[in-house]
Amino acid sequence: MKAVGVIEKDVEWRDSRTYFFWRLRRKLAEFDLRKKMIEAAEVGRGVKSLTPIEASAIMKSWFLETPGMTDAMWSDDKVMLQWMAESNQLLEAKVVQLTKDCVVQEVYQVMTAGGNTAVVGTSGIV
């Protein structure tokens, strides 16, 4: 299974409870943040929905943007959880910004769709 890539590493029996405790906590926190990100991207008509893989990639990029974080640290469950706890407000702000970016993208797409869509849309605002 390790040769195929299903298993990342061997876990000694005596360390298994601790390992899987931290692994489960990390995955639950990751799934929660990923769910928030996907919901944030589904505003309005949902120009483009965010897949779980894309959300994970964005989350990893946010992690790597943090000073001192490396690609090797991304695999460490305790470091990842500590980062998520310390950066909770920053992550919430990034999710809000993701929502804003999706709204801007949708409005831009509607405004540039052609025809009188832009005139009708802006007349409702003004």
Image (cartoon, helix red, strand yellow):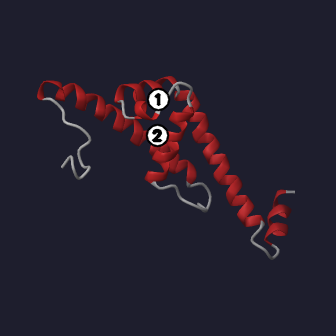
In the image: residue 79, left or right of residue 62:
left
Q: Residues within 10 Å of mark 1 (few under 14, many from 20)?
A: some
In the image: residue 101, left or right of residue 57:
right
Q: Name the residue that disc number 1 marks.
A: 84
At numbered mark 2, what does the secondary structure look like: helix, strand or loop?
Answer: helix
**Vertical arrangement, residue 35 with respect to residue 11, above or below:** below
Dot 1 amino acid type: Met
Which disc number belongs to residue 33?
Answer: 2
Q: Residues within 10 Å of mark 2 (few under 14, many from 20)?
A: many
Dot 2 amino acid type: Leu
Q: Position of residue 67 (x, y in %)?
A: 56, 26
Q: Nearer the viewer, residue 85 or 76?
A: 76
**Considering the image in quadrants, where does the C terminus appear?**
bottom right
Which disc number belongs to residue 121?
Answer: none
In the image: residue 54, left or right of residue 95:
left
Question: Label 1 near label 2: C-beta < 8 Å?
Answer: yes
Q: Residue furthest bottom?
A: 115
N-term mark: 2 or 1:
2
Q: Position of residue 49 (x, y in %)?
A: 53, 58
Marks 2/1: CA distance?
9 Å
In the image: residue 83, left or right of residue 27:
right
Q: Residue at 26% across / 41% down in the picture?
A: 8
Q: Position of residue 63 (x, y in %)?
A: 51, 34
Q: Residue at 19% across / 36% down in the picture?
A: 10
Q: Position of residue 107 (x, y in %)?
A: 72, 59
At numbered mark 1, what does the secondary structure look like: helix, strand or loop?
Answer: helix
Q: Nearer the viewer, mark 2 or mark 1?
A: 1
